[in-house]
Image (cartoon, grey):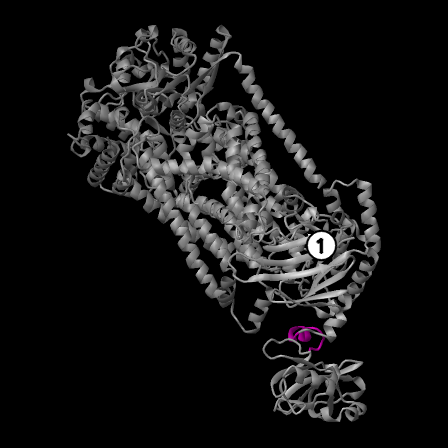
Amino acid sequence: MKKGTKLLAVSASLIALSLVTNACGNSSSSEKTTLQFFSTKTENAPTYKKMIASFEKQNPDIKIQLSSPSNAGTVLKSDLAKNSIPDIMAVGGDVNYQQIQKAGVLVDMSKESFTKNTMPQYQKMITSISKGGKLDAVPYATNASGVVYNKAAFKKAGITKTPTTWDELIADAKTLKAKGITPFELPFQDSWTTMGVFNQLSSNMVGSSWIKERKNNKTTFVSTYKPVMTKYLELSKYAQKDYMGTTYNDGTKALAEGKAAMMINGNFVIPQAKTSKKSADLDMFKLPVNNDASKNKVTSGIDVALAVSKNSKNKAAAMKFVKFMMTEKNAKLYNKEQFSFSAIKGVDQNDASLKGISADLAKGDVVNYPDHYYPDGFDMTQVLTQTGVNQTKGMSDATNITKSLKKADSAFKSANVK
Amino acid sequence: MQANADLNNNTPAPRKSKKRKKKVNWTLTSVMMVLAIFAILGPLYITVVIALKDPSQMTNVLSLPKQIHWENFKNAWQMTNFPKMFLNTLFITVVNVIFTIFTNSMAAYVITRYRLKNKFFNMMYYYFISAMFIPFNVIMLPLVKEVSAFHMDNIIGITFLYIVFGLPQNIFLYSGFVKEIPTALEEAAEMDGAKPMQIFFKVIFPLMKPMHATVAILSFMWTWNDFLMPLVLLSNPDQQTLQLAQYVFQGQFSTQYNLAFASYVLVLLPVLIMYVFFQKYIIAGVTSGSVK
Amino acid sequence: MQETIKRKPKRKGKKIPFAYYMMVVPIGILFFIFHTIPFLRGVFYSFTDWSGYGTWKFVGLKNYLYMFGNSNITHAYWFTFKFALFATILVNAIALAIAVGLNGKIKYQNFLKAIYFLPYMLGSLIVGFVFKFIFGNLLPSLGQTLHWGFMSSNILGTTHAWIGILIMTIWQGLAFNTLIYLAGLQSVDPEIYEAAALDGVNPWQKFMRLTFPLIAPFFTINLVLSVKGYLMVFDQIMAMTNGGPGNSTTSISVEIYTQGFQGSQFAIQSANAVVLFIVVLTISLIQLRVLNKREERLG
Amino acid sequence: MVEINLKHIYKEYDGNDNYSVSDFNLDIKDKEFIVFVGPSGCGKSTTLRMIAGLEDISKGDLVMDGKVINDLAPKDRDIAMVFQNYALYPNMTVFDNMGFGLSIKKMPKDEIKKRVDNAAEILGLTDFLQRKPAALSGGQRQRVALGRAIVRDAKLFLLDEPLSNLDAKLRVDMRTQIAQLHQRLQTNMIYVTHDQVEAMTMADRIVIMNDGKIQQVGTPDELYNKPTNKFVAGFMGSPSMNFFDAELKNGRVSNGRGLDVAVPEGRLKVLREKGYDGKKLTVGIRPEDIHTEQVALEAMPDAVVSAKVEVSEFLGTDSMLYSRTGETEFVAQVNARDYHKPGEEVEMAFEMSKAHFFDDDTELTIE
């Protein structure tokens, strides 16, 4: 009996303690204006934290609470359901943005002063996926897809010049393979990485108007995408053996260590690869999809766009923070730390690792990710991982391509409701 | 009418005293031992070893670390905001266990005792039992909406939900036990002048101790290891739990095994420590809870 | 004075004091508000086109009809049933074998029991992460060193990914089932075996004719709980494969979560959840009926 | 001064058309030791529980000291009760078990201690006060249950088959103890049992019940010697009374299957007055009223039968002879000196002046 009482006393004091700490957390912030800042990318949190710290110094009456959960989509969706979205949101130009935009809870950014400083082609990427063609988020950072390659590995294989045509790419791959270096490291265990390859092929081979026709059932994957899938499968033939079982983390590691020479994905591969080997000498070039080098474009999309909630109680303060983030100084900081490209005019990416494509980006000579226009429930990665499994199982390419594209069509059809 | 089992007559049935010294089967012992070490402890060994290494030592995963990298724990500790998450999780778990035991045992007692005499309580019994079959997925999104309308999307709110949501299973667990308690005990207490609340808390509640242990363990495990409910309900980063924090390491663009595994160890450790100390009670509790 | 008082005959044994109602009703109401109402709303939404936010309208049975025509959803059912079947059979068979082993004349019995029960204490999420690592890094590198073809690639990246999930599920699920079987085995009176020994029964007959029937109630518990749990399999899939490759390991729960919560098919997946609820309930009830009958026959 | 009146008390349960207890009438005087006896399911426990307040009274009035207490909660009735299985609180020590009722009433601690110590003294439990019930023997638990009632100092004691879980020897001991306790406490006690020996040895008055109805109320002597019906006659006494279906003819009763004995003049007169001459009736005679001594055979020559002993039990002072005359079986309880082996033919005299006669239809005693 006595033991029980003691236990009860201990737990009671524990409850009290937790209550106090929880309550304290709330009360200390209540005097200030507190803004919720939500980010869909977990890995840029440290950079945001730096910006928040200097902003709070300048504006002692404003406190910013950063939240950057790993499964941002789910959290955002439940926030929407709760009807209480964060004051400021940093989202990619993708489904996450589309969902909140469609719900009509965002402030129109087109009139803001800082918007004028952003590159028009990136503004268009936002408006093109917005309901009513509105600019409900201002583009902030963009990413660029291409081929991240290990310079040392290329050197070892005796390759001196990065390929500019498809045939050159395949030839280089053959050379690398002969030297015992994996040409392409494809980390398809993490299914999202399949899109890194597919998007680049697709954006360079299929016109941007195709998706509209597909949505209206005027065309199909089967009728259009055979060449794309052929190249997709050809690339995978030069991948490491267990490419369906390699995780993104392990893939970037192999790339950094020079076991593999190339990874077809975005600029964000570079900082990740460097976590496992700091000294890795990496650069990027655009994926030479076509044999006519002039037709090859960098696939680039909105990595981060900033949006403000219509229902925010502190809209002015929120806008102030967005404006702060949009300043050249902060945009540069972001570029430097995240190896990304800015949507803001005049803020260039000068990192050596990215010089292979930064020129294209600065020119604005880019195409957007096709999957940003896919309907909500359509998951192309599911189709592509199945394709990969089919291949490793030994299915013939012709059958595999037909099967995969048929599956893509039926999945598209069931997602393309309303 | 008075066919109740006699709780007082619980002198253990005379043990079959033919405990002849049986010969130990060493072959079987070694088979079971080897299986336990490799199959069960193996994955745990891997977890700990990885947590203690740095990426450069990962070439031979199974080897013991040449150099122990405690800073993995330090980094994981910081990256997951461990102290805060730990306190949050502890708060949810402890408060849930305490309140579950008091409120759920009370409801289970009354429902079990009176369900054969009273249609209302019988109905309640079937109501709760059938609720056991409702997958959480079905109620997830409507729940999120409702909970935020009540401003309960925080630690205290979720704790409250755990207490309420545990009811069906706990009523199921307690009811088997309550049936075994002779009604004469309550009648004796009634004759002694006790009011219903006094009867429950002074006579019945202490008797339910073995089942309290079971319920406490199961509730603890549930809340400590749950992540779907905190995931959808707790959006404020200061209000999250340890399991949720593990997701930090599963972000799209970064997975650092050594840190992640150090963090897993940090989450598993409290449970393991508890298991080492209370292993006997936990095993006995879970068995009695499920077999009754 | 008292003889004039005429009382209406009461038909109840004894009136239940108000306090007892107070011990159930408040928490019952809370349960109704926070569990039943969301459930009913979920059922309600399955007849609408609500996407989790914004406006909605009634669509009748459209979502249910859509479900049957959607290959992803039908595949999820097929996968879930296959998984639940294999997991239930394997977990129970292996658990029974371990329980028989632990119940044998072995030394360090309590220590071994504690070890075998350990996985039950660990959350599926983290165990899933650990196994993902083992399948993705440890086994392939081991397989490559040993030149074992089947082990040189990550099973989670093949059509056999579900076997990887199955292995992790067995690893974790064994603990509970073993414990229950062990409790069952220990409840058997040793005199029965002594009598059987006198009748000249061989070990296999002993197990099939005596032990197994005697632990039938424990078998029922394990089977019902296993099937129910595995039909709702979720955590380990999210941790290990996210439903892939392709949608080969997408269980019903994962489908509901990913498509209903992250995609915009909330209403359709509400319908799916309602169907899942009915499936789980029906299977559990059938099992209880069949197994209880069998138990009676044996008992 | 406690007087309890039960007036036309009825009990019916849901879904059961028959009354479990019907028309129960009893006036209990101050300090009386009343025993309810009857076969299991006869309603004696239900009646006790209605008095305790553990069951509602369906119809009728329960009056205590002139006040109707039907709707009074058990705790307000000032009644103490001892349960069949003792119902000791397993989580409390003996001391706490006994003091529980008092502490619920918020009695000062030292007063509780005084009372518990006192009760423990009386019951010889002083050394066990700090033990839990599980560590006590059956008899000790029994005494704790009694002690718990004693300390309450209640107006009325109810005991529900308190000895049924004890072994035979202990039961006899406790019987005496309870009787002594009643002497000492001078409170009303109602004691329920199915054991007629307990009833006979302990009661001031016995209430014998069957099928929810009172069969007879009276002192042990009255019930034994003047049972009002066949049920009471058969229930009281061990071994049971021998019953024969017989016909009264020419001053003799015979069943045509071996029994044929004369009825003494006085009894015959009554039977004839009631019109049973030449009619069927039931004859009852207790085993101890069948004799084998020479003196008896000579004294009652027209009630002697010749019987064959089939089983004989030697009980020390007495012998039980399970015998048969013609096709009629009966038991005789004779002096141990008159022991007979099975198979022996023995002459036996029926002491018909002590016989009981019952109407075949109503089963009531003819008198």
* Whole-percent x, y for residue D110 in the image: 82, 41
**Vertical placement of residue D289 versus B53, above or below:** below
**Vertical placement of residue A87 versus D203, above or below:** above
**Vertical placement of residue D295 versus B25, above or below:** below
Regarding mark 1 in the picture, which secondary structure is present there? strand
* Whole-percent x, y for residue D355 in the image: 71, 82
Q: Is residue A305 magenta?
A: no
Which residue is more in the foreground, D50 or D138? D50
- Camera sees residue A161: no
Which residue is more in the foreground, C294 or B89? C294
Total marks drawn? 1
**Vertical placement of residue A50 versus A170, above or below:** above
- Camera sees residue B84: yes
Over which residues does the magenta segment extend?
D229-240
* Whole-percent x, y for residue C229 in the image: 44, 46
Q: Is residue D239 magenta?
A: yes
Q: Residue at x 69, y 36 (%)?
A: A6
Is A232 left or right of D229, judged from the image as shown? left
Which residue is more in the foreground, C183 or D211? D211
Residue, disc 1: D81
Which residue is more in the foreground, B67 or D276? D276
Judging from the image, mark 1 belongs to the subunit labelled: D
* Whole-percent x, y for residue B66 in the image: 55, 32
Quadrant in which the C terminus of chain D is drawn: bottom right
What is the three-letter code of the residue carrying label 1? Met
Quarter-wise, where is residue C251 in the image?
top left
Q: Residue at x 21, y 30 (%)?
A: A228
Is A78 left or right of A394, judged from the image as shown? right
